[in-house]
Structures are given as C-alpha cells and as structure tokens.
Amino acid sequence: MGDNAESAHGGARLVKFASSLAGVAVLAFVLGVSVGAKEGTSVFAYIPLLGDGLSATPDDAANLAPFWKAWNTLEERFVATHASSTPPSSKERIWGAIEGLTTAYGDPYTVFLPPEDAKIFEENVNGNFEGVGMEIGMRGGLLTIISPLKGTPAERAGLHAGDGILAIDGEPTDGLSVDEAVKRIRGPRGTTVSFSLLREGESVEIDVVRDVINIPVIDHSFDRMTGIYTIALYSFTGSSVPLFDEALGDLRASGAKKLILDLRGDPGGYLEAAVDIASRFLPGGAVVVTEDYAGKQENVVHRSRGAGGVPEGMDIVVLIDQGSASASEILAGALRDHERATLIGTPSFGKGSVQELVEIDGGSLKITVAKWLTPSGRSISDGGLTPDIEVERTVKDANAGADPQKNRAVEYLRMGK
C-alpha cells in the first residue's frame, strides 16, 4: 500500500485476474495515493486466476442500434475545430463507451480504467508513487477525505477526515470520479496541489506540497498511571500482523488489563490482515466478516483462526471515526458483534464493498461484486458502524491537541461505564 490515500479503493478487496499478468490488491490510497478505495487504498487480496471465465458473447436482448447510430454519426460527420478535439481512435472510443457504461451503474467504486489509468492504479496499490498521503471516497455525492495518513503532507497541511473536496487546483470536482480525482491529486515530489474544501459548513483553501509517501502502520504505549495499554493501527498492510504481535507481546509484559485499540483515521488495507488481527481476539471459528454476493455466487465467510495473543478477561475499547474505513470497519464490527469490545467515537466511513479487477482490452474494469457484512449481518456500506458511545472530536480539538474521544475511552475503562 502506498499513498492510496489519493486513490479510491477504500477498502475493497480487489482481485486481479492472471490474464492481466499482474497481481493487484483492493483499496488504493489517493494522493500519494490508495483507492476507496485504497476504493481507495482497501481490503486487499492477491488471488491470481487462470483466465477469468467471463463471457464476451453479445447480449441479443440489448438494442445497440442507438449506440451504433451515434458511433457512425460521429465517424462520418465530426469535424475537429482545434487541436484538442482530434478524433479518438476506435480503441479509445470503445474505452470511452465502457467508461460510460460503468458510470450508468451509479457506483463510485465500479469504474473502467484505460491502460494508462490501470497502470497508475497498480502503482498505487504497490506503493510506487508520490503524492499527499490521504484516502478519499464518495459520500453523499461529494468527493470526501476519508483520512489523511499519519505523518504525511496531507496531515501536516491540516486536511481532516470528513473534509469535502469542492475543487482541485481550481477545477470543480462535480461529476468527478474518485479515480479521476486521484489522477489530479498525485504528482511529483515538491510540486503543489491546491484544495477547496467544505469543512463544517464553511469553505477552506489549503495548499499541499507533494512528497514521497511512507505509509505508517502502528504505534503502541503503556500508561502506568491508568494501567491502560494503547495500540494505534494506521493501516492494514503486509507488515501489520507481525507488528501487532510485537505490540501484544509488550502488552502482556506490561501486565495491563485494559486496552484501547485506536482505529481512527485508518482507511483499511488487506482483508487478510484484518482477519488475522481479529483472530488474536476471537475464538477459532468465530465469524469475522461475510462477503455477500446477493445470490450471484455463494457467500464467502471469513472466520477467526483462534490465534490468540490478547489476554483473557481484558477490557477493550475500540476508537473509530469517519476516517475508519474498510478493514478497520471489519475489525471493529467483529469485535463489537462478538461483545469483545465497546466502540467509542463517531460513525465510521462505511466502505463495505468488494471489488474485482478484470482485464479488458489492455485496461481494467474495477467492479463491485459483493458487500461486507459484520457477524450480526449488518452491511458496513449502510451508514458504517455506529459507536456504542458517541463522542465528537472537532477540528478545533485536533488543532489544540485535545482528544475527548480517547479521554472518554480512558474514563470508560477506569470506571467501567
């Protein structure tokens, strides 16, 4: 994962078919980027398949006469009036038609990526890029920052989870897809990108200087005064599980009986990492999350492996906010549904869909194929997770270094309510 925070996969499990000759993940980070997923970056799974088994047979029930009339009319009558209106090639026209087809489904995570964009996408999920370091997604039709990643230009410049992106470098984002926004946001180190943001009902202008993005993973510490151990996860990467196990080793050595698991601002990442970390808390066989394919194929249930590591009887609070997405929501939802933890904070982002990546004519069709369900059967996409105890942390709080959400978690663990 990399700066998919400028990407839009935001938590999906992207599957790249072997026919495209490249492995892919889900969820790219924008601006440095990840998609939202991770589209932006993502709940990722590397699942190479020998051929995608998908049909290219024409659908005889579809009346394509209007399409061909438009195609032939443009072919015969279009006249270029300036250099930028040079007629596209047949292949470019086909790509444009597929883009229009995916747009008709109204799903911000179902998009067609022409070859150049598909290459950028793969660079994003592999972390090979420069940008600002944030995850973006679509909320209520508005391009929205899911989370600026810790220690990145986006965070240092003062971008916040929940900020709506009204314009990028002066160009309005109306009708702009997450993937298109990612292309505008990412760029060479040292260059500047300007944002017009909607924050708490007011317009805010912020410039961000792009840089090489290094995705943070984890912090952990023990407060001897309160007896509370805190583990903050910033992303679910390939290194998250071993680093989490190191933190658990320190937790056990500390003798702490109370834990704060901080998932605020964590835009997600690999599905396997979420399941593995949940397995440290839950008994073997317990449901972590279900991929619901709406009857189009058999649902996939991911269960705890019962790996252990979290001491028995430990009181646990999970902190979430609108920057918690995808894999974060899977982990938090599983711990709450199994009554292993109490959620404190604000509602999570609600990135609960599964994407597959299918190679098409040199490009890639990223298509939503399923939704994530928590163990109790709740769809994560349906408004995200609602905390058991709702506590706001305003921009003013953050700028002042105040943390009422964590303070409430400490109070809850010390007082038991």
Image (cartoon, helix red, strand yellow):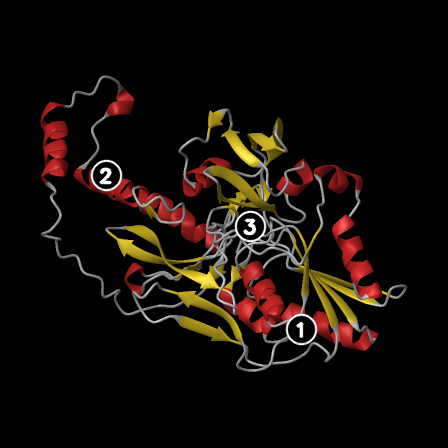
Rounded to the nearest angstrom, the CA distance separating label 1 from label 3 is: 27 Å
Residue 23 lies, in percent from the top left, at: 39, 62
Q: Earlier in the sequence, mark 2 or mark 1?
A: 2
Residue 414 lies, in percent from the top left, at: 84, 64
Indicate left or right for 114 with 179 as reference.
left
Residue in the picture at 59% in, 81% down: 306
Kindly identify the amino acid type of the residue bearing the numbered disc 2: Glu
Characterize the local packing of mark 1: few (<14), some (14-19) or many (20 or more) Cα atoms within 10 angstroms: some
- Residue most extreme to the right: 225
User: Between residues 183 and 302, which one lies in front from this camera angle?
Assistant: 302
The image's mark for residue 349 is 3
Q: Secondary structure at mark 3?
A: loop
Kindly identify the amino acid type of the residue bearing the numbered disc 1: Asp
Q: Secondary structure at mark 1?
A: helix
Residue underneath mark 1: 245
Q: Nearer the viewer, mark 2 or mark 1?
A: 1
Characterize the local packing of mark 2: few (<14), some (14-19) or many (20 or more) Cα atoms within 10 angstroms: few
Residue in the picture at 67% in, 47% down: 151
Residue in the picture at 52% in, 30% down: 166
Callout 1–callout 3 Cβ contact below 8 Å: no
The quarter of the rendered structure image containing the C terminus is: bottom right
Q: Earlier in the sequence, mark 1 or mark 3?
A: 1
Q: Earlier in the sequence, mark 3 or mark 2?
A: 2
The image's mark for residue 92 is 2
Indicate left or right for 320 with 173 as reference.
right
Residue 209 lies, in percent from the top left, at: 61, 35
- Residue most extreme to the top: 81
Rounded to the nearest angstrom, the CA distance separating label 2 from label 1 is: 49 Å
